[in-house]
Amino acid sequence: MKLKIISGNANIELAKQIVKKLGVELSEAKVERFSDGEVQVKIVDNVRGADCYVIQPTCPPVNENLMELLIIADALKRASAKRITAVVPYYGYGRQDRKAEPRVPITARLVANLFATAGITRVLTMDLHAGQIQGFFDIPVDHLYGKPVILSYFKEKNLSDVVIVSPDAGGVERARSFAKHFNAELAIVDKRRPRPNEASIMNIIGEVKGKACIILDDLVDTAGTLAKVAEAIKEKGAAKIFAAASHGVLSGAAKQSIQDSCIEELITTDSIPLSKEGPVKKIVVLSVAPILAEAIMRISNDESISALFV
């Protein structure tokens, strides 16, 4: 089955790096807009009977990028593609994965249904906000992790007396796994969130005094919570403070918040393209293109994906 890589407009640079690693050309597809804003797609290359991979994180602007992905998938389906895999390094709406209060939607499930309806037959994604989101799909999901590239970066820094800090109870499993590979201790921040994108730090469980602390999360959005966590562990005597997250959403004044905080560096990946607006001095971006390229090749050859993370 011939391999075809198609990219939407969400992260073209990442798509170019992936095809370079794979040693193939990016398939030609026109993803444009009508004057009223409607998405217009034309797949220029012949994809009949092809194994197609659409690289499109549903990052901001989320709805625009989501519609592009769905319409590209529909175009491929109607062009008789054999298999359509959505390569979604960042899965938008992933934070709306449950009914946290009455009369709210489970949008992560709705988006999963839209994927299947559009003709997508498999999803390749990375560091979902909650692992159970995989169960929202009625099609196969391959779940990758940005941990190896972030872990490699910190190991090269040769930090001593390291503590991995989970910024909330929900991230403990992620932080514990990272701490195990780093041979480091674990600390947990107990926080309460009175409203979306706002958090109050309540307590820190674990010893951070005199330690090099790495705050680990799956994503950084406004960076308000991250800055508060950093401030709290600094007050508890942390010697150095770093932060790491697979997805740098960095909306609003996030970059300025990071710049003004006591965080030395924020390590993130190129799952979401870094905006050129605002300061970026403290932000280090690592590429996940090699992991995604290897996963695409393994899926195409019907090989194991889990072997990548053994």
Image (cartoon, rainbow, N blue to C red):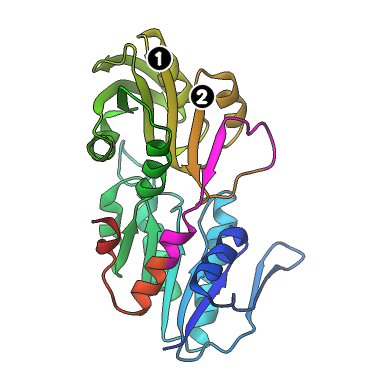
Task: Assign a secondary structure to mark 1.
Answer: loop
Tag 1 or tag 2, which sits nearer the N-term?
Answer: 1
Query: Which portion, as a residue range, is magenta?
Result: 276-293
Q: CA distance from mark 2 to mark 1?
A: 11 Å
Q: Amino acid at mark 2?
A: Glu
Q: Where residue 166 sits: x, y (%)?
A: 31, 29
Asked whether residue 95 appears in the rendered view, the answer is no
Camera-side residue of 176 and 253: 176
Name the image quarter holding the N terminus.
Answer: bottom left
Camera-side residue of 209 and 165: 209
Q: Residue at x 32, y 14 (%)?
A: 202
Q: Where residue 254 sits: x, y (%)?
A: 57, 30
Q: Residue at x 25, y 15 (%)?
A: 207
Q: Residue at x 69, y 42 (%)?
A: 276
Q: Where residue 9 sits: x, y (%)?
A: 63, 62
Relative to 290, 72 lies left or right? right
Residue 285: say if magenta: yes
Numbered mark located on residue 239 in the image: 1
Q: Is residue 243 above or below residue 31?
A: above
Q: Amino acid at mark 1?
A: Ala
Relative to 131, 87 lies left or right? right
* Quadrant in the picture for residue 167: top left
Numbered mark located on residue 264 in the image: 2
